[in-house]
Amino acid sequence: MHTTTKIALFSATALALFGAAAISDPLPPDLTYRPLPSLPFSKVKQTDEAQKPAVMDRQHALLGDRYDLSDRTIADVAMSGGRKGVQAGVRVKTAPGGEWDELASLTPQQIRDRNLLPLGFLPLPHVKQATGGQVFPEKQIGEIGRDEGRDLRRFDVDFDLPDHLTPEFPPPIFLTTHPELGDVSRGDLLTIRNFYEYMNGIVTPVQMEGLRLLLTPFPQEEFNQTEDRKVAAQSTGVACLDCHSNFHTNAAFHLTPDVRPQAERFRLDTTSLRGMFNQQIHGSKRSLRSIEDFTEFEQRTAYFNGDHVSATRKGVNLPDRPNQVAMMAQMQNIIDFPPAPKLDSAGRLDPAKATDRELAGEKVFMGKGRCAECHNPTQSFMDNAMHDLKLERFYKVGQTFNDQVAIPDGPIKTFTLRGIKDSPPYLHDGRLLTLEDTVEFFNLVLQTKLTRQEKDDLLAYLLTL
Amino acid sequence: MMRLWIVAFGLAVMPSLAAAQIGNPAGLAPDTRFKAPGVPEANQTNYQDRLFAQLMTAGGLAEVDLGKLAVSKTDHQGIRAYAQQMIDSHGKANKALGSIAEKSRMPVPAEPGEDQKMARSHIDGLKGREFDLAYLANQVVEHQKAASLLAWEIGSGEDAALQRFAMETLPTVLEHLQMARDLTAELTLQAQAAK
C-alpha cells in the first residue's frame, strides 16, 4: 500500500476512534461531586429528625447481629489514664457451622462459597451511609457544649457504639519533650478555652500557636452556616481535636474522603495522633509523606470529604504552610505514646519485667502469628507501608449492608500497636471491638492457625504495648 | 417477578435486603409524599432514580444485543458461555427493571444509547481474536460503569424498589466484571505465548 494512502487510512481510523470517545457521555456528575440539596433546610431537618429513630434502630440491629456488645472488662487492666477498663473477649459473632476452629480449617474459597465469614469482619457501615460525615460521641458533644457553647450534635444521627467500647475520655497526654511529667492533661479535655492555662510553661510559643489552631473550629461539611448542614443552628464548624481528643481519639467516625460513589466509601475510625514523630505515611489511603502535608490537606478531606468544590461554598480554611501548618505539625510531633514500662528501647520485652505469658506472646508476635512482619517493634510497631490483606477472598463483594456496598479495602497503611489497648475499636473502620477480635481476624486472614494458648499469650503481650 | 429474578441470579437473600434504605433527605424530590414521618410513599422517584433507570435500561439492552452478536461470532468457548450468560442475566434484569419503571411511571428507552450502538458497530466489524478482545474490552468498561451506577442509585435514589433492584444486581455485575477480566487475561496471555 502506498505510504500516503496508509497515513490517510490511519488518520481516518484515529479520527473515528477519537470521535467515538468524544460522544461517549461521562457518568452523572454526582457520582463524584457532592450534589446540592434539592429541598429547603427546614424540610430536610424535619425529615431527618423523623427518620432518626429508624436510622438508629437499623444500625443497632446490624451491630447486634454482628457483635456481642456487652460490658465485660479484663481484670486488673486499665487504659493509660487509669479511668477505663479494657474490654474482654471475642465480640465478633460467628455463623452456625463457622466457629473459630472450623474457620481456621477452611480455605478462603470455602468460607466465601459457604457464606461463613463472620459479618463483623466485613466493612462497618456509617450510621447513615447515604449522608456520611463526622459523628461525635456523646461525651465529646457534652464537653464541647459546656466548655465552648459549640454544638457538635447532629439532628439526623447519633453515635452508634456503646461508650464502654470506645477509648477513655478525656485521654491522657504524654509529651516527648517532657517524659518526666507524665500525663499533662490535668484529666480534662483540651479546648480553645483552656489550652493556654494548661500548656503555658511546658510548650514553646510555636507549639502553642499550633495547638491554638488545632483547637480552632473551622467550617466543615456537616457543621457550617449553609443549608447543607446537619447541625440545628448555623455552626462555626469543628476543630481538629474534636475527633483527636487530647491528640488521641474519641472514636468519632467519618467516611473516607478517598473513594466514590458515596455508597462505597468506607467508614473511618479516628486515628490516634500519639507517636506521630515516627510515622512516615499518613491517611489510610493517601499515603501522604509528611504530617505537614496531612495537616494542610485535612481541610480538604476530614473537613470536606475530598470535595474542594463543596468546600469553597461553605467557607474553607486553608492554613498557611510555613506559618501555620508547620506549627500545627510541630505540636503534633511532640505527642508521645503512653508509657510501656516492660518494653526496652528497641520495643522488645525486658525479660526481667515481663511475665512468661507475655514473653510467649512476643514469640508468637514475632514468629508464627506474623504480626511483626508489618508491626516492627523497632519502628514503633509500624513499617511505614501499606498492605492489602485481600479480605475479599473470604466474601462475595458488592453486597449492601445498611446502604454501604462492601467492596475490597485494597491497600491500607499499617497502624502502630504502641498503646493499642487505649484505642478501641480496631482496624481503619473500627469493625473490630476488642484486641481478641483482632487476634481472630488476623489469625483467619493470615491463615496462621494459632492455638488457644497462643492466642491468649498474644493478648497478654498486646496489653504490654 | 422479583423473587424469580433473585433465584435466577443465584443470590442468597441477605438480612440487609429486608432493611429499608434510608437516604439523605436533602436529595428527595421536592414533591415527595410521606406515608409516615420521614418515610416516603412507594414508587416516587427523584432525578437520580430517573436517570439511573434510563442509563441502566440502555446498558442492559446493549448487553443483550452484544451478547447475541458474540454468541454468533466467537469461536472461543469461554466467551460464548459468558455471552450467553449476559443474554440471560441482563434479559431478566431488564424485565425486572422495566416492571419497576412502569410502577413508578418512569419512561425508559427502547434501545441502547448512541455510544453503545457505535461500539457495537465497531466490534461487529472485527473478526476472530480481534473481535473477542474488543468484545471483552467493551464488557469490562460497561460493567465498570454499571457497578458505579448501581452504587450511585443505592446511595442517592429515592424509589425503594429501584434501590433494592440495585442492591440485588450489584454483586452479579461485579461477578460479570470479574469474568470479563479473567477471560481477557486468559486471551492476552495466550496471545503473548503465541508470539
Image (cartoon, rainbow, N blue to C red):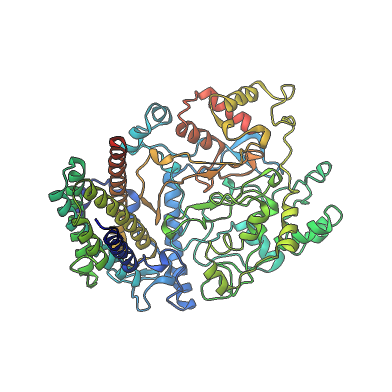
Residue at position x 41%, y 64% from top?
A31
Look at 21% across and 41% down and name the residue there: B78
Left or right of A194, for residue A275: left
Q: Nearer the viewer, residue B2 or A151?
A: B2
Left or right of residue A213, residue A459 in this image = left
Considering every residue shown, the one lying at the far left of the view is B72
Q: Determine whether, in the image, residue A351 is placed left or right of residue B118.
A: right
Q: What residue is shown at x 58% (from left), y 65% (from top)?
A: A153
* Vertical position of residue B34 compared to residue A186: above or below: below
Of residues B135 and A360, the one drawn nearer to the viewer in this rendering? B135
- Tell me the quadrant of the picture where the N terminus of chain A can be found: bottom left
Q: Residue furthest right?
A: A201
Q: Name the quadrant of the C terminus of chain A.
A: top right
Where is residue A432? Give x, y as percent: 51, 42
- In the rendered image, is residue A97 in sight? yes
* Residue A464 visible: no
Q: Is residue A286 above or below residue B106?
A: above
